[in-house]
Image: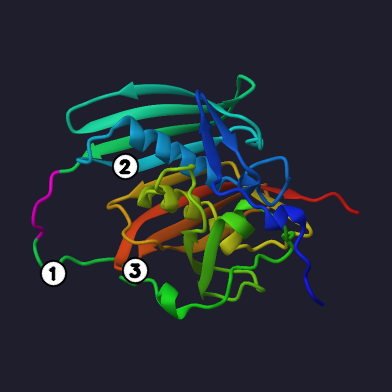
Amino acid sequence: MTHNPSHEETSLPTAVYVEDGATWQPSVLSRGPWDARAQHGGAPSALLVHLAERALPDPAWQLSRLSIELIKPVPVAPLTVRHETHPGRSTTRMTIDLCADDVLVARGHALLVRGQPFTLPTGLPGWSPEQLRPLPADCQERLRIPGLPDGVSFYQSATDHRVAQGDMTQPGPGAAWFRMNVPLVQGQATSPAMLAAAAADFGNGLSWVLPVERYLFANADLSLHLHRPPEGEWVGVQSETQAHGGGVGTVLSRLYDVHGPVGVAIQTLVLRERAAA
């Protein structure tokens, strides 16, 4: 059967967000899988990284950790920002709030570290594996999470993805490479840390263990830790989900670029059984 693209699909925006004065305007490319009125968690997570990074223009500073609280579904609607900074000599901490109609919907706690390059001793042990393989150039299969609808969304339209490990038709651990199809912010380059945050939020779908037709497994938060900025246009995510009948799950993701590991991410999942049809 031939797919005839809708008008919406053939006239897509050129970015996920547009900055309009004091307001951030999300496009349809920010949409999530659960509700077309709500954003995918990766979109506001990457926006919070952008806001943290541009508050410290000195390139000596590096985003080391970002803990994101997804307090309410982030709507596909104008967002405003509240910002508080606690500077220090070696570390700076920020709290960044995203609000919709003056209601707090997401909050990011960022830790930035002033870099101080030095030479490490040779022969230090690394993670195993030290690289996520196969590399993106050798991966062809697009990530297809069973049960998620097709259409314009952050998952389907704003990001490009290639499965590296695992069978996406079966529950269990999985790994994939991610890059952006469009800039996250109109007129701005998407930084490596922004891409890492966007990709890390896919961990729960990448390593699903419950069928989406019967269960919800949305993440309520995302904690991203980077020991170095990723390099290049691809970020790899290797994820494993743990679920419990009490209604809570966790996802642990290891993050990579084509040169090796760059950090880890953890998500807390809210598990719910869908109402019977």
Residue 99 sits in quarter:
top right
Which is more toward the observer, 262 or 183? Answer: 183
On the image, the x and y values in percent for residue 38 come to: 68, 41
The residue identified by callout 2 is: 63
| Mark with earlier residue (3, 2) | 2
In the rendered image, the quadrant that contains the C terminus is: bottom right
x 66%, y 37%: residue: 76
Relative side of 15 to 146, left or right: left
What whole-number distance in Å separates the C-alpha atoms at marks 1 and 2?
26 Å
| Mark with earlier residue (3, 1) | 1
On the image, the x and y values in percent for residue 33 come to: 69, 52
Are the residues flagged by discs 1 and 2 in contact, CB closer than 8 Å?
no
Are the residues flagged by discs 3 and 1 in contact, CB closer than 8 Å?
no
The residue identified by callout 1 is: 123
Question: Given the image, on which type of amino acid does mark 1 rest?
Answer: Gly
Element marked by disc 3: loop
Which is more toward the observer, 37 or 211? Answer: 37
Residue 135 sits in quarter:
bottom left
